[in-house]
Image: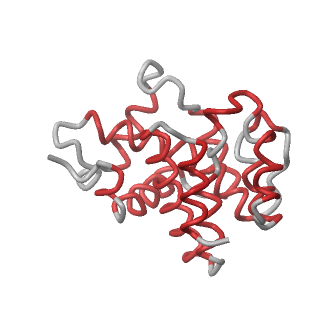
Amino acid sequence: MDRDAAWELLCEYTKSEGLRKHGLAVEAVMRHFARKHGEDEAAWGMAGLVHDFDYEVHGDRHPMDGEPILRERGYAEEIIVAIQGHGNHTGVPRESLMAKVLFAVDELAGLVTAVALVRPSKSIHDLEPRSVRKKMKDKAFARTVSREDIAQGADELGADLNEHIAEVIAAMRTVADDLGLAGQ
């Protein structure tokens, strides 16, 4: 598999620009953590990019119903298992570091995006972890984002939540233009 094929898969099944941007955000964060841990950046990036590829098509059955598609397209077992475990609803245990990181960054990338978009600057470049933590407390803000998953993900990594948020922000800044978060 290569990155272009992963992008094509995402675009084939995902029509929402917002969900495509979410894939790009999670890809950037996964690449960041792969570099940090000396792991395969391309594989981790692909896991992040396509983790929600079948969400619009399969809804509640996502990502389990997407598994045969990933296998048919030749994705590595580690990527498939990480994608299957990126939500608690699947019951798939997160045993690899890739799987743990994907779970830990998925919901958080969504929250970081939402917080950046409500800032006057509409930019991730001036976003600080304390602003994200403040919005985490507001249950009405980005209410579909699971605060419990964010906290659990950091805990499973043994990471301080503020430091984890800072790393996710830093990784997403590298693709701010692609995410529409570079500001006005």
Looking at the image, residue 76 sits to the left or right of residue 179; the answer is right
Residue lying at 64% horizontally and 54% vertically, measured from the top left: 102
Looking at the image, residue 129 sits to the left or right of residue 54; the answer is left
- Closer to us: 43 or 15: 15
**Residue 173 x/y as whole percent:** 34, 60
**Residue 85 x/y as whole percent:** 77, 48
How many numbered marks does the figure carry? 0
Residue lying at 59% horizontally and 57% vertically, measured from the top left: 48
* Figure quadrant of the N terminus: bottom right
Q: Is residue 181 above or below residue 64?
A: below
For residue 149, which quarter of the picture? top right
Q: Is residue 141 above or below residue 92?
A: above
For residue 114, which quarter of the picture? top left
**Residue 77 x/y as whole percent:** 83, 64
Residue lying at 80% horizontally and 53% vertically, measured from the top left: 94
**Outermost residue toward the top in this view:** 140
Looking at the image, residue 162 sits to the left or right of residue 182; the answer is right
Q: How is the image coloured?
A: secondary structure
Q: Is residue 21 above or below residue 88?
A: below
**Residue 81 x/y as whole percent:** 81, 56
Residue lying at 42% horizontally and 57% vertically, measured from the top left: 166
**Outermost residue toward the bottom in this view:** 38
For residue 167, which quarter of the picture? bottom left
